[in-house]
Image (cartoon, rainbow, N blue to C red):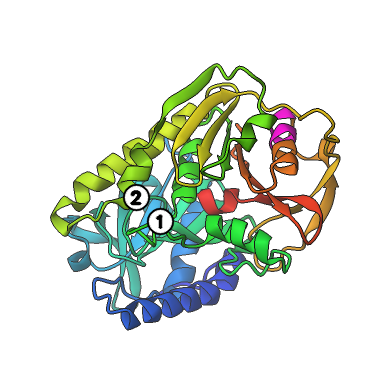
Amino acid sequence: MRENPTYQAANIAAPIVEEHFERHLEEARKKGETQLAPKPDARAVAGIINATFWASFRPEEGRFPKISIAYLPPEQAGQPLVFEHSLPLTSGVLTKLAPAVERPEIHLGVWTFGEELRVWGATRTIPSYCFVIEDVEPGLLVVKHRRLIGFGKYANVVVLKGERVKVIDEEGTSLPDCPQLLKALLAFTAAATNGPHHSLNVLVQLSASMRAQGHGGSLLVVPAGTERWRESIAQPILYSVTPRFSALANLLQQKVDYEDRRQWEIEMRRAVDMIGGLTAVDGATVINDRYEVLAFGAKIARPEGRPPIDKWVITEPIVGNVPVVVHSTTHGGTRHLSAAQFVNDQRDSLSLVASQDGRFTVFAWSPCEGLVHAHRVESLLM
């Protein structure tokens, strides 16, 4: 028999998570998708969240656990490692098994046997829309799922931090009703059109790579076919790129057969991580909206005659979030200020800023508000 969760946020999040997966799985079936994960029910979700939460506070040999759990039966897990005897889903069991699944994309497999949630083994292979929960740090959990395309950063659904439940805003309802701003930011937070790979959001993959390298960095996304962005960059640019580095752009235009998919994904990860790595160099990396690299290590400079930015609007892609106007000195440091200034002067561009502490901000111009808009998106990238 399943015990009632003692972590109350689990009970709050569970029906929200169940509804999310039910809706997305139904939409995927209508599109003809067949290799889909089972829908997690609210009781299973609450039980898994509860056990993972309490396990996150239990150090083993001086280290707090890093756990990733996928909810699926063994037969849907490709070639899994299956225990001879499944184990009860308890915080103690999870703590002991955690070292085995610390590496990326390895999950403990959990399924409902009878009325009990049990750990049946481990897997690297999970189907689309499989419920996954990850223990990021003590008391910080992220519910996510594998994207339909099966590549890159998983899509986050809910972030739980202590007793707070943050529901990811998929539709942009937390943003001001401003079409041009919505187009700019939803191209980041929602599925974007990238040639044949329409469900692959490149900006999310680049952002996750920037955040993972841990050095902090800035990425400027400028319109293709114009050099006006150079007005906001100190000259000369030490690391200007000629010809443009187009590996990522070329991969996005390829039509890939099923047999070649694995190699394409490997090349995509390499191209994304190469650009993400460039952002660790002091200065900003510049790409155009075709994902061609134009420069890195570029120093942002305010054009002569342009006023310094003194405030911007800040939001977070969380359901119920309310935009707030903040003074430029209260949000981030020099890197954030220069990125915001760039967008203030180059209003058809985006600035993406990764902080060393894990924060991640997307700056875009909001014509409706007449201000730069800062969108805090680290909750999408955990």
Q: Position of residue 150 (x, y in %)?
A: 31, 58
Question: Looking at the image, which residue is at 18% across and 55% down?
Answer: 80
Q: Nearer the viewer, residue 360 or 42?
A: 360
Q: Which residue is mark 2?
A: 252
* Residue 337 visible in this rendered orientation of the protein: yes
Q: Point out the stretch of residues depicted in magenta.
A: 334-339
State yes or no: discs 1 and 2 in contact (Cβ < 8 Å). yes
Q: CA distance from mark 1 to mark 2?
A: 6 Å
307 within the magenta span: no
Q: Secondary structure at mark 1?
A: loop
Q: Quadrant of residue 356?
A: top right
Mark 1 burial class by Cα count in 10 Å: few <14, some 14-19, many 20+ = some
Q: Quadrant of residue 285?
A: top right
Q: Position of residue 252 (x, y in %)?
A: 34, 50
* In the displayed structure image, the side of residue 24 where residue 355 appears, left or right: right
Quadrant, the N terminus: bottom left
The rendered magenta stretch, by its main secondary structure, is classed as: helix
Mark 2 burial class by Cα count in 10 Å: few <14, some 14-19, many 20+ = many
Question: Looking at the image, which residue is at 52% across and 69% down?
Answer: 5
* In the displayed structure image, the side of residue 109 where residue 177 appears, left or right: right
The mark nearer the N terminus, 1 or 2, is 1
Residue type at mark 2: give it. Answer: Leu
Q: Which residue is mark 1?
A: 194
Q: Nearer the viewer, residue 322 or 57?
A: 322
- Is residue 154 positioned above or below 310 on the image? below
Question: Looking at the image, which residue is at 66% across and 70% down?
Answer: 173
